[in-house]
Amino acid sequence: MTRPYRSALYIPGSRPRALDKARGLPVDVILFDLEDAVSPDEKTTARATLAEELGKGGYGNRLKVVRINGLDTGWGTEDAKAADAMDCDAVLLPKVNSAADVDALAAITGKPIWAMMETPLGVLNALEIAAHPKLEGFVLGTNDLAKDLNTRHRADREPLLTSLQLCLLAARAHGVVAVDGVYNAFKDEDGFKVECEQGRDMGFDGKTLIHPAQVAIANAAFAPTQAEIDLATRQIAAFAEAEAEGQGVAVVDGKIVENLHIVTAKATLAKAKAIAELETS
């Protein structure tokens, strides 16, 4: 099954009630956070709380990713050791600047590694980071990146587009998942929908979320529409018919359909199937 990554919700590792509520949320990925969402005086207890809650299970088929503190902090190494023993699917490392940072985490944990892409140096080294054999996912940290770049907030995100696209290029070159950054105004549903659609159209696999209220919009934006499913089905059928007649192209809705379009069409149907299976499991 091609796993969907439409919605990736941050949940503070220090809050048992939030951790429990996440068991019933229709998200594709849960980012269990030990870093930004946890105050310094709660770091140690949050680690133990998260381990206990993950040990209880109940998160179904959701991908469980633990974001640790940086290895250059007083908590990161112990976070990494603890996460290695937790019932999680991957460890998310903040502020990754190079493949050497991934190496350092890989020396501590055998879990797959995801990287927060949120620094100028990290973006410039995105290709070598994505190429690391333990690296499976990118999460864009657009707030930190915007701070470091000294950009101003714009609804079109034009100041960040180069960084977003460089990370996407690296991710696609090495088959790595790429999840877009957060939208801070969680009550602004219209603005959030626009930014989800922008990220989807750019090629991101999904969106990171800071509030459960954002889940439904992200899930809808990053899922194939019924029109896209219907078109993909018709393209595959038309191309198969053309091939049976010895032709290399077909025509659907007045547009040429070649083999490359069939690859995309099959991926669309596979994603729709994976979403349907996830939602009924």
Image: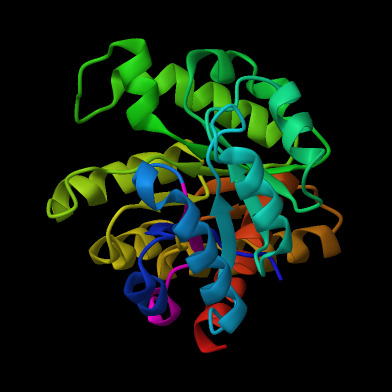
Q: Is residue 165 left or right of residue 262?
A: left
Q: Quadrant of the C terminus?
A: bottom right
Q: How many marks?
A: 0
Q: Is residue 226 left or right of residue 75?
A: left
- Residue 201 picture location, percent across and down: 42, 41
Pick the front one: 67 or 278: 67
- Residue 186 picture location, percent across and down: 19, 52
Q: Is residue 185 left or right of residue 83?
A: left
Q: Residue furthest bottom?
A: 280
Residue depicted at 33% across the width and 65% down the height: 215
Pick the front one: 257 or 113: 113
- Residue 20 picture location, percent across and down: 40, 79
Magenta region: 22-34
Pick the front one: 212 or 197: 212
Residue depicted at 38% across the width and 52% down the height: 42
Q: Is residue 235 above or below residue 40?
A: below
Q: Is residue 261 above or below residue 106?
A: below
Pick the front one: 156 or 201: 156
- Residue 270 picture location, percent across and down: 65, 67
Color theme of the render = rainbow
Is residue 84 among the parts visible in the rendering? Answer: yes
* Residue 33 among those drawn in magenta: yes
Residue depicted at 44% across the width and 69% down the height: 27
* Residue 103 among those drawn in magenta: no
Is residue 6 among the parts visible in the rendering? Answer: no
Q: Quadrant of the N terminus?
A: bottom right
